[in-house]
């Protein structure tokens, strides 16, 4: 493996070995403390424009599996790891993580002191970086000059509607950069799903006569999406049961008058205890967020806080006081991460049921 | 039950160390006593293990040095009226005792609550049949199995299920696992043994799952039902090799997210079903394709799995569990400051390092044992390696698991090809070296995976290790080869050997080229949350996190993994040393690799370094800490010689270990132990020396000491006089044992047979008998703190008529050897008694 470098905006240089695609790449550096599920993580569209640092010491050890994609066309900008292992376990024994990343033009760099890097990002906050062949002035100039798009949802969400037919409840999923785990959970519950593009109007949704609407996960800032999305949410929540996850949750909060702020440091991991306020139960779930709902901004006449992270105090769930609409910041579908909160999908089904 | 009612808790200790459990139970016990103390709870402790550090932490009036039997425990309950009883640091024996006391009503009659395991679950622990019922209840597939009580039933059931089958005794008295039987005669043999081990004279016969992947999860649960997953342990060896004899890695490296989370869900469901509190260790068998899995064992108490999880994550399992037993919620448990940050108890540990555990077997010391690994555990200890890569962790564990003090791995090149194949299929204790040798000879990853059922991932890693080894060998004195070698865990000693040079040359090359170790913290947030951990391991990366503690630091070299002989007591010795060093005002750093060691308990020292206790690694630690003194419990001749050569100040304890014994005879039946300080010779105890089966004809058969010695007052006075005169004339310090022989004639004066350093095992016994901690005195002597005033305080009655004995225990039964005369080098543990002789 050829020597390559991870360089950061603050001038730091981490030498390592390239794997995956050989391209030069630039993105926001984020780290994920999950101990497994590298495939699910790198294929999650929330990492659009981002270079992911894995604290798990080894990636690649189980190859690439057909049932572990969170999107077909991943849009992460790179993987930074301590160690990568070249193993294929699929039927043809032909698809290792390295080959997969090559196919999708995603560069990786291994041999990095990821622990130090993570501790450094902890100090600096979110920072931009590049994976390059030569860590010279030119590379740094390029890094500083690169402006990352804020049209992230438009780039990863489906441009056209598509169905996932089944016999159960009729569910519309609004795709802001949907992770497949959500579709899997709906599919398990026999939902007849139609996925609509992120800019679908309330009328587009209503025309499909759904029993419920799910606002999906996705990349980037909710503040970069047009007001029309919030209007759609406000219209729909009054009429149709709604479940929102990740970016969807942030949009749901905005639509109901709350503020969403950018975290100094985005958080990706599955090991924080989360309190379910109504029962006092503690659950664990994959949290992956660069933004957070500002607790002081919540209009308590409209929204109730339902889940709270006990380590950083962040709001992890909301429910509407008047409408059958609720949201969670974390990923209840796991993939990767614990299944502790997968029953939220059952709750969604139940709410759709009571509406009849 | 209201916790306010719990003020006094009877803790059942682990008893003598043996195959199946070593120091981990006692180490957990120490933490639990600490936590109880903080909550104002009075702990009572029953144990007859002379090497128990926990016994030192309990008020003497609350200590019961007795064997852990139902009768003894019942007597304590009736006399002391504890509010609760804790079986979770006593291994299987404690569970068995509680089961008995629950059955005969002693616990209810005396209103004693069992902590950790509810009464309703108690009878189902270690009962595979009941476990299966629970599995069905939580919707899990179960292995085809049936309970039998006679041989005839067993034959019928086995024919139904089809061979191979597994035989498991129900509620066994000893820590046993599954016995694999390929055919009827195997099974008849196993069933007859199993029936005799079972408290109910019953066994379970079940479908074989040999070759499945073995995964263990360690989780915590509070009485509210909140659960935290601490760690997943992956056995590199498949089912068929006892997990205690298997190489184990954490975190799991070859599981998918779906597989791992299903196991987590199942473990939690079982914990809820049984309503366990505290720590639970769940074993799973996972089919190679990941399509199905079974639960094979649930242990809701401390064991080697929980201690490995604690060591790997820095999560203080036993300490947290103690709080949970008292009905505290996981969210409310607040840990002592040293545990990184205040919410550690409720954070699921996330690791950014790899830990590999390699077992140690007793075959060097017990030559006639069958060295094959199977479903019955044979190892007596283990050692871990921690690294940032799998290769590094494997190599470090492997280096620590070897007997060579020079940090070299033995060669397997003299094995024939047919021996290799045979050992691949029927592994011996040299398993990992044979796997490496097979790869060296060109075996392919896929065929090795087929033969051994070890995941291909590990062969890829082994192969990489060999590639690096080749690279180092073919590039002597290459900077790049050294950089790469160290990065992946090769020791300086290994590299020196490959380059046919000395370790100094290798280290100089590293120094000149800035190839320096970087220590990384062992903490449960993978770098996400800030804090200063106390546990570290080394690697070779960009950033070092471990800074010099102080200018008054001592470094203590731990003994590494337990083996037979004095090592059983060495951890106790090390622990007591560390306590005294701290008390004497030093900052303490311990290096050790034994995940079960009490001496690695985070509250005991200021810094713990889990790295091979090898010359190169020690020098790396010295370079940072600049200790004023290095303490070596027991002796490590090569290491101390090499360190002294480099002008480091070394204290070997007990100090006289360095001096050779002076023996006139190889036979003695009377021992007189003394403490020798400058100008003072203090007799401590005169004892009868015996072998396990009567008279010892050689010194290495002396594994039993009994008091008072069968000496007349005149005889005792005579040897006291002789000993003082002898020691006055010979320069010795510390603790010595004078040896004498008597011939049964009480008129005749005992004959002087020689003098030797007091054994570590004996010192532990002397502590218990005299109530004076001699280990601490040895430390104080080394620090120059022994003076007239202190000696005057020692209240030792050499004429005491108090009856006591200590007796070595041996692993012959577990190794399926006929009862034989045990030697000192074959002791696996010891038991002490004050009443029944």
Image (spheres, coloured by chain):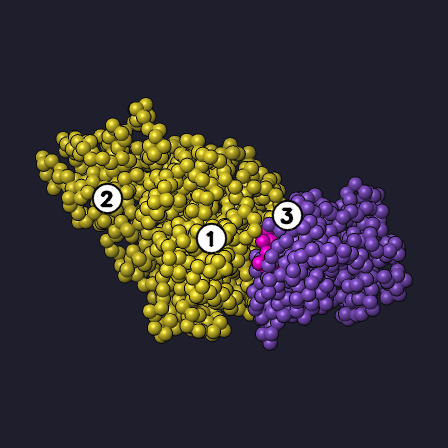
Chain colours: A purple, B yellow
Look at mark 3 in the image and give the residue it sits on.
A120
Residue at x 69%, y 67% (from the top left corner): A105
The stretch of residues the image draws in magenta is: A109-115
Task: Tell me, yes or no, whether the highlighted magenta stretch contains residue B334.
Answer: no
Mark 2 vs mark 3: same chain? no
Residue at x 69%, y 68% (from the top left corner): A104
Give the label, 2 or 3, closer to the camera.
Answer: 3
Q: Position of residue B800 (x, y in %)?
A: 24, 31
Residue A287 shown left or right of residue B51 in the figure: right
Instruction: Examine the rendering and report whether any part of residue B426 can be seen.
Output: no
Query: Distance of mark 2 from mark 3, alpha carbons?
Result: 54 Å
Give the label, 3 or 1, closer to the camera.
Answer: 1
Mark 2 vs mark 1: same chain? yes
Q: Provide the chain ID for the residue under circle 1.
A: B
Look at mark 1 in the image and give the residue it sits on.
B510
Quadrant where the C terminus of chain B is found in the figure = top left
| Residue B154 position by quadrant | bottom left
Residue at x 52%, y 66% (from the top left corner): B457
Q: Few, some or many C-alpha atoms within 10 Å of disc 2 (few <14, some 14-19, many ≥20)?
A: few
Query: Distance of mark 2 from mark 1, alpha carbons?
Result: 37 Å
Residue A183 shown left or right of residue B803 in the figure: right
Q: Judge whether A52 appears above or below B655 on screen.
A: below
Q: Which mark is residue B476?
A: none
Q: Provide the chain ID for the residue under circle 3.
A: A
Report the front residue among B210 and A217: A217
Report the front residue among A237 and B667: B667
Looking at the image, the residue that sits furthest to the right is: A203
Give the label, 2 or 1, closer to the camera.
Answer: 1
Q: Judge whether B522 appears above or below B164 on screen.
A: above
Q: Secondary structure at mark 2?
A: loop
Mark earlier in primary sequence (2, 1) = 1
């Amino acid at each position: 493996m050829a020597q390559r470098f991870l360089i950061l905006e603050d001038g730091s240089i981490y030498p390592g070995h390239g794997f995956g695609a050989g391209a030069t790449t630039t993105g926001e550096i984020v780290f994920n403390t999950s101990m497994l599920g590298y495939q699910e993580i790198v294929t999650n569209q929330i990492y659009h424009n981002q270079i992911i640092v894995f604290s798990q010491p080894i990636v690649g050890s189980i190859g690439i599996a057909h049932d572990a994609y969170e999107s077909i066309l991943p849009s992460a900008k790179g993987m930074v790891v301590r160690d990568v292992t070249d193993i294929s376990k699929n039927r043809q024994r032909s698809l290792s993580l390295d080959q997969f990343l090559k196919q999708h033009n995603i560069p990786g760099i291994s041999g990095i002191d990821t622990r130090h890097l993570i501790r450094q990002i902890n100090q600096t906050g979110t920072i931009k970086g590049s994976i390059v062949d030569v860590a010279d002035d030119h590379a740094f100039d390029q890094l500083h000059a690169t402006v990352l798009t804020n049209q992230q949802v438009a780039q990863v969400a489906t441009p056209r509607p598509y169905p996932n037919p089944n016999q159960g409840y009729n569910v519309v999923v609004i795709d802001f950069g949907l992770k497949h785990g959500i579709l899997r959970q709906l599919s398990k519950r026999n939902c007849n799903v139609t996925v609509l593009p992120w800019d679908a109007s309330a009328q587009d949704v209503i025309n499909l006569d759904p029993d419920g609407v799910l606002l999906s996960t996705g990349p980037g800032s909710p503040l970069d999406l047009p007001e029309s999305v919030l209007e759609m949410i406000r219209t729909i929540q009054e009429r149709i049961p709604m479940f929102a996850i990740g970016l969807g949750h942030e949009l749901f909060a905005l639509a109901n008058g709350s503020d969403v702020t950018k975290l100094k440091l985005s958080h990706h991991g599955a090991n924080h205890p989360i309190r379910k306020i109504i029962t006092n139960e503690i659950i664990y779930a994959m949290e992956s967020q660069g933004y957070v709902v500002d607790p002081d901004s919540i209009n308590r006449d409209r929204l109730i806080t339902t889940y709270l992270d006990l380590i950083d105090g962040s709001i992890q769930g909301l429910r509407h006081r008047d409408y059958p609409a609720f949201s969670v910041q974390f990923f209840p579908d796991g993939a990767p991460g614990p299944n502790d909160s997968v029953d939220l999908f059952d709750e969604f089904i139940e709410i759709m049921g009571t509406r009849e | 039950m209201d916790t306010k009612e719990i003020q006094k808790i009877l803790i059942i200790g682990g008893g003598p160390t043996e195959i199946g459990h070593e120091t981990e139970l006692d180490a957990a016990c120490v933490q639990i006593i600490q936590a109880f103390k903080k909550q104002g709870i009075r702990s009572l402790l029953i144990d007859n293990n002379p090497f128990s550090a926990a016994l030192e932490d309990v008020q003497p009036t609350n200590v019961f040095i007795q064997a852990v039997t139902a009768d003894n425990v019942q007597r304590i309950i009736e006399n002391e009226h504890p509010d609760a009883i804790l079986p979770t640091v006593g291994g299987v024996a404690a569970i068995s005792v509680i089961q008995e006391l629950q059955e005969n009503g002693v616990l209810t009659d005396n209103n004693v609550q069992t902590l950790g395991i509810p009464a309703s679950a108690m009878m189902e622990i270690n009962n595979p049949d009941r476990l299966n019922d629970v599995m069905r209840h939580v919707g899990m597939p179960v292995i085809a199995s049936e309970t039998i009580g006679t041989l005839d039933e067993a034959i019928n059931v086995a024919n139904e299920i089809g061979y191979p089958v597994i035989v498991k005794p129900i509620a066994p008295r000893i820590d046993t696992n599954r016995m694999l039987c390929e055919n009827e005669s195997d099974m008849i043999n196993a069933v007859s043994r199993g029936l005799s081990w079972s408290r109910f004279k019953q066994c379970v016969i079940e479908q074989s799952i040999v070759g499945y992947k073995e995964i263990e999860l360690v989780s915590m649960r509070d009485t509210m039902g909140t659960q935290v997953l601490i760690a997943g342990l992956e056995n590199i060896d498949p089912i068929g090799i006892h997990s205690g004899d298997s190489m184990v890695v954490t975190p799991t490296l070859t599981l998918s997210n779906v597989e791992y989370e299903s196991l987590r869900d199942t473990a939690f469901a079982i914990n809820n079903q049984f309503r366990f509190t505290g720590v639970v260790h769940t074993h799973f068998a996972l089919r190679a394709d990941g399509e199905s899995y079974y639960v094979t064992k649930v242990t809701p108490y401390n064991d080697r799995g929980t201690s490995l999880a604690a060591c790997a994550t820095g999560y203080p399992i036993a300490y947290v569990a103690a709080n949970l037993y008292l009905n505290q919620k996981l969210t409310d448990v607040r840990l002592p400051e040293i545990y990184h940050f205040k919410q550690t108890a409720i954070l699921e540990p996330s690791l950014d390092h790899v830990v590999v555990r390699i077992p140690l077997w007793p075959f060097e010391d017990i030559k006639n044992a069958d060295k094959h690994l199977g479903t019955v555990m044979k190892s007596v200890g283990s050692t871990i390696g921690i690294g940032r890569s799998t290769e590094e962790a494997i190599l470090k564990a492997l280096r620590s698991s070897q007997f060579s003090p020079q940090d070299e791995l033995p060669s397997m090149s003299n094995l024939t090809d047919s021996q290799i194949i045979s050992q691949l299929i029927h592994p011996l204790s040299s398993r990992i070296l044979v796997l490496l040798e097979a790869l060296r000879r060109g075996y392919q990853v896929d065929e090795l995976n087929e033969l051994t059922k070890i995941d291909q991932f590990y062969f890829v890693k082994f192969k990489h290790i060999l590639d690096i080894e080749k690279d180092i060998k073919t590039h002597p004195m290459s900077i790049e080869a050294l950089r790469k070698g160290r990065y992946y865990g090769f020791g300086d000693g290994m590299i020196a050997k490959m380059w046919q040079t000395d370790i100094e040359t290798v280290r100089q090359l590293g120094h000149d080229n800035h190839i320096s170790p970087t220590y990384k913290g062992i903490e449960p947030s993978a770098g996400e949350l800030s804090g200063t951990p106390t546990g570290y391991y080394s690697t070779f990366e960009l950033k070092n996190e471990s800074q010099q503690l102080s200018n008054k630091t001592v470094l203590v070299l731990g003994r590494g993994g337990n083996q037979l002989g004095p090592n059983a007591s060495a951890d106790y010795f090390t622990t007591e040393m560390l306590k005294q060093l701290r008390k004497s005002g030093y900052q303490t750093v311990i290096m050790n690799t034994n995940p079960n060691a009490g001496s690695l308990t985070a509250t005991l020292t200021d810094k713990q370094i889990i790295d091979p206790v090898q010359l190169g690694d020690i020098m790396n630690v010295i370079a940072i800490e600049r200790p004023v003194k290095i303490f070596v419990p027991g002796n490590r001749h090569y290491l101390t010689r090499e360190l002294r050569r480099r002008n480091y100040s070394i204290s070997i304890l007990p100090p006289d270990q360095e001096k050779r014994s002076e023996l006139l005879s190889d036979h003695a039946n009377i021992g007189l132990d003394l403490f020798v300080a400058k100008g003072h010779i203090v007799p401590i105890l005169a004892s009868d020396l015996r072998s396990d089966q009567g008279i010892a004809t050689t010194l290495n058969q002396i594994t039993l000491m009994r008091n008072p010695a069968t000496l007349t007052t005149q005889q005792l006075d005579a040897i006291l006089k002789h000993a003082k005169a002898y020691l006055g004339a010979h320069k010795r310090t510390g603790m010595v044992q004078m040896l004498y022989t008597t011939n049964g004639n009480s008129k005749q004066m005992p004959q002087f047979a020689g003098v030797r350093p007091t054994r570590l095992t004996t010192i532990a016994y002397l502590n218990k008998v005299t109530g004076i901690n001699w280990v601490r005195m040895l430390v104080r002597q080394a620090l120059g703190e022994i003076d007239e005033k202190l000696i005057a305080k020692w209240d030792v009655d050499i004429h005491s008529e108090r009856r006591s004995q200590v007796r070595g225990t041996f692993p012959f039964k577990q190794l399926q050897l006929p009862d034989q005369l045990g030697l000192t080098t074959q002791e696996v543990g010891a038991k002490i008694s004050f009443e029944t002789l």
